[in-house]
Amino acid sequence: MIDPWVRTMAVFADRIDAGRRLAARLEPLRSRNVVVLGLPRGGVPVAFEVAEALDAPLDVVVVRKLGVPFQPELAMGAIGEGGARVLNTEVLAQTRVTASEVAAVEARERAELEARVARFRKGRERVDLKGRTVVIVDDGIATGSTARVACEVVRHLGAATVILAVPVAPPETLGDFPEADEVVCLATPAQFMAVGYHYRDFTPTSDDEVTALLDAAARRMRHGGAVPAGADADVDVTIPAGRVLLAGHLHLPAGAPGVVLFAHGSGSSRHSPRNRFVASVLYEAGLGTLLLDLLTPDEELDRVNVFDIELLAARLDAATRWLGTRADTAQSAIGYFGASTGAGAALWAAGDPESPVAAVVSRGGRPDLAGPHLAAVRAPTLLIVGSRDHTVLELNRLAQDQLHCTSRLSVVEGATHLFEEPGTLAEAALLARDWFVRYLGAGTGAEGTAP
């Protein structure tokens, strides 16, 4: 059954927005025995929002195509976890591929599948699908070939009902989709061009982000959706800043010695998958985090505001003072983690003589935008830049020359501006963790310290 909600050229802000809108459509499933599976990589941020809204476990469904040996682009079947294998008997008959040839291709593809599973799950067991309603989520489909295989593999693993849920897809793809018992799609535009065309922000999802989201979902299920015992806070917050209210998310582990405020250039720090990943690493090290939107949704539409460093710094200062009014954070050491123009705002604010900030980390940031305030910064400052982000790297070198505080420039080899390359965001997160652990207080989850 195809159930398109909106037949428009809908544009989603990002995968988080798409996931929340898809979750609203899937709300009737809350009472069923549901498991949500994301198709790596881009489908996982969408699936994360769906699973959280449905209070359901989140996992990935990793599949590999079995290509005909002499024509690899032609699929003769597919494999999944748990020994799942689906073969296309018609293609096998036409191509006359032997059983031994199938076995050789499967062995090669299974090795790659297992490697990907190990990378994404990091030792977590696969969620049992037997007898359950399984919702397979992607950020959109074009031909639907991967989604079809995923549905077949999931059914092979024992799913009682298979639902494919996507934000956007061409109507002709969904016109005949027998692999799923139900297809839920928010938008089926007649003039479909590509999945990314329907997103304002379609930044690639990294392996690190996938594992961070899976880790966060696993923690939620371990604690039954509740705040872990002994934790001070894991809550959405609203922070007054002049005539506006800023949205944020505060996460405090028990006994956190410090809180790190996140400042993102676009304003939407709490929705940034990269910031969420770094925040999860800091949390595991025993530090609190405040993911903060420095701009309101309306303000963010005006690009000028993104470069209004004085405004962003004032908002960051307001959030810092707000933390000082809470009983659970009033005595906490304060750190700033800035990305893009948010790094300029963090250093601008840190340059205030009355600023309480104890450490600053910039990731792919523009510290140069803090201008003369750089010389007044007293807090130890770490500048993290990708080796392939040539222009920003040079700007960071020039900015470091203006700092009179303890500072370090760490270059992550192979990384571009957004740290999308495998392992680069994780390296940046560990650098930030060690810096904050050293200057905000020791954390039980940290494995090293900044030299």
Image (cartoon, helix red, strand yellow):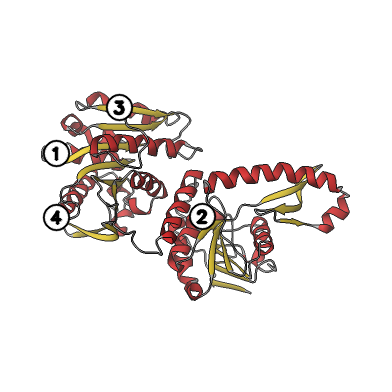
Residue underneath mark 2: 44
**Structural distance between the alpha carbons of marks 1 and 2:** 40 Å
Q: Name the residue carrying label 3.
A: 408
Disc 1 residue crowd, few under 14, some 14–19, many 20+, Cα 10 Å = some
Of helix, strand and loop, which one carries label 3?
strand
- Quarter of the image where the N terminus is located: bottom right
Please say if the residues under marks 1 and 2 sit with CB atoms less than 8 Å apart: no
Q: CA distance from mark 1 to mark 3?
A: 21 Å
Marks 1 and 3 in Cβ contact (< 8 Å): no
Mark 1 / mark 2, whichever is N-terminal: 2
Q: Position of residue 244 (x, y in %)?
A: 20, 59
Which structural element holds mark 4? loop
Q: Nearer the viewer's eye, disc 4 or disc 3?
A: 4
Q: State the residue position of label 4.
A: 325
Q: Relative to 184, say whether 355 is above or below.
A: above
Q: Quadrant of residue 403?
A: top left
Q: Look at the picture and state if 225 lies above or below 101.
A: below
Q: Amino acid at mark 2?
A: Val
Nearer the N terminus, badge 4 or badge 3?
A: 4
Query: Mark 1 or mark 3, which has the lower sequence index?
Result: 1
Labels 4 and 1: the sequence-earlier one: 4
Q: Quadrant of residue 170?
A: bottom right
Q: Position of residue 292 (x, y in %)?
A: 29, 52
Of tags 4 and 2, the one toward the viewer is 4
User: Circle 1 is placed at which residue position?
Assistant: 352
Disc 1 marks a residue whose amino acid type is: Asp
Left or right: where does residue 326 sit relative to residue 254? left
Q: Earlier in the sequence, mark 2 or mark 3?
A: 2
Point out the image quarter for the C terminus.
top left
Residue located at (31% from left, 45% from top): 286
